[in-house]
Amino acid sequence: MSEFFSAAALVTTIGAGIRYATSYLYAALGETFGQRSGVLNLGVDGIMLLGAFGAYYVVLETGNLWLALLIAAVVGLVMGLGMAFASVTLQAEQGISGIGFYLFGLGMSDLLFQKLVGTPRPISGFPEIHIPWLSDIPVIGELLFSHSLVVYGAFLLVPIGTYVLNRTAIGLKIRAAGENPAAVDTLGVSVAKVRYGTIMFGSMLAGIGGAALTTELGIFQQNLTAGQGFIAVALVYFGAWRPVGVMYGALLYGLVASIVSQLKTLGIIPRSVSDLASMLPAVITILALVVAVQRERQPAALTKPYQRGG
Amino acid sequence: MRRLTVTGILVLVFALVAAACGGGGTTTTAAPGTTTPPAEPLKVAMVAPSAVNDLAFSQSMYDALLAVQEEMGGESAMQIAYSDNLFVVDDAAAAIRDYANEGYDLVIAHGSQFGSSLQEIAPDYPDTAFAWGTAGDTFGLSNVFAYEAASEEGGYVEGVMAAALSTSGVLGVIGPIEVGDAARYVNGFVAGATAQNPAIDVKVNYTGSFSDVALAATAANTEIAAGADVLTGTAQMVTGAVGVAKDDNIPWFGTQADQTQLAPSIVVASQVYHWEVVIKQIIDLIDQGTMGGESFVINLANGGEAIAYNPDYSLPDDVKQLAEDTAKGISDGSINPPRPGS
């Protein structure tokens, strides 16, 4: 056990957990906006995959990481437009159409990868940025201030998202569309426009989350996300539809995953129960989710399409 | 009602698109019957769980088929068809049945997860030979061959090299789930490393997933933090670990395919599979009228396994000599890597 508590092991474990949490955080923050406005987007994982492939391919061809982020964002916006069209304009059942979008993203990202790239080739991601002074602080510096730009970006979005949701007129419209769309409508605000906006914004963040994943790992391959988008949806419930709560959820998931990994590496978790231990992040998140959902209420209009006069 | 209809249509459309995309490529090299070849070419079909250019399991078999085809004299002698990315076993089973229906002489189900499907399908097509792996069981069927790799042998050789290269005395191994080919490789690696340096500390981390690239990267990070200065790993998710090794300039040993191109600066060597050794024997048997019932193992002795060194990695001569002596010892039986079930 002492090995685990060595400073180096702890710092690496927590640092790895923070990095691991990053792509979840992007996706879950985006999903928070959609759900606050009343739309459940289960297609997140597929959007992440398409965004990841778009970013990967751009880096492979041009080496331009900023262009890669932009492309991932555009891919997300386009997928979001499709999702919004299905769930808002066509008023399709959100869970089912979301799964449709997921399958589309899963298949399409792999098809494009096979046709355009084929054999996995490595790419270089964003370099680690050591923030001056702060990164020199022992332990804390290496933990919090020695990550790549995409990691900082995700955590920076938490206060921004909180501010937008709680302190701005747009945030008010978003929350109202999720709680009482009819009231929003009577005030002359288009529920459809609000929901198109949140779904597209959320999908854009999912696309960027995919880009963060592929650039951090330096590779793309079939089903790169391995279900991260679905965990992200759960993290929104876990975080009680609040960006800060969602961040805690993503960190909890990422840290448990990296701690379990570290305990396996050190042999503290024996190999005989290794596969069981792999389920721990999901199990702990689900347990925490159950507790969290007890005290919180979901947006009243979540998953309910809005029909005027209906 | 309108909502239901719209939902139904959406689901159908997406399911179709996804099926078209996700089902992967089905390719036939030549349409039968369009030309009249001098003799009827041997028709071989392969069904694979991942892409045939995955730098790992599926590619090893596809490359072998191409090599055998070239040796036999090209497409006029042997036709190859494949369906890849069939990670859904039911889809793979449908493809296996299709190929058998279309009159292929040999249908290869390249994945141990396809075994029970093959057990059901093979008896319906007594004139078709089937092969599957990695496995040793032919189910007692006269038209099923089985093949497997003694991956512990290359693992042992790489373990010896890794222990010789390590200065920290700690090695890291990233595995998927402790089964089959992966477990054999890892056990061989640990045994080889321990034989080279009894005091070596090999940290084995089975992530629990064949596909979670991010988790493999996390595992590699934790192993480096625990002092590992040489890494290895097996299964298709190790690309994430290779990336971490590259960033930290940690030597890497690969298996299943030559992984040099993933990180030319740090890949020392890879165990590669040459399934052509097995395929040629199977084709010879089919020519003689034997449609199955035998199982094959590729290993260092029969040339089905080899260590591919990265020419750009400056491996010390004495370590390479050590590796070659170890490989020779395994081939002639003087060194015994741990065998499964022993």
Image (cartoon, rainbow, N blue to C red):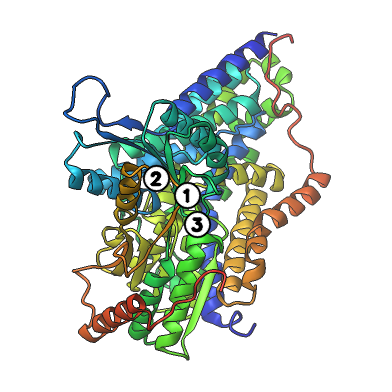
Say what amino acid the circle numbered 1 marks: Gly
The N terminus of chain A sits in image quarter:
bottom right
Q: Could you tell me residue B222's position as x and y percent? A: 51, 71
Q: What whole-number distance in Å separates the C-alpha atoms at marks 1 and 2? A: 8 Å
User: Foreground mark, 1 or 3?
Assistant: 1
Q: CA distance from mark 1 to mark 3?
A: 11 Å
Q: Is residue A52 above or below residue A144?
A: above
Chain letter for mark 1: B
Q: Chain of mark 2?
A: B
- Let me know if residue A90 appears in the view: no
Is tag 1's residue or tag 3's residue first in the polypeptide sequence? 3
Check disc 3 and give the amino acid type.
Gly
Q: Which residue is mark 1?
A: B293
- Image quarter for residue B159? bottom left
Q: Which mark is residue B136?
A: 3
Residue A297: x and y in percent read 79, 38
Mark sitting on residue B290? 2
Q: Percent position (x, y) of residue A43?
A: 56, 33
Element type at mark 2:
loop
Q: Are marks 1 and 2 on the same chain?
A: yes
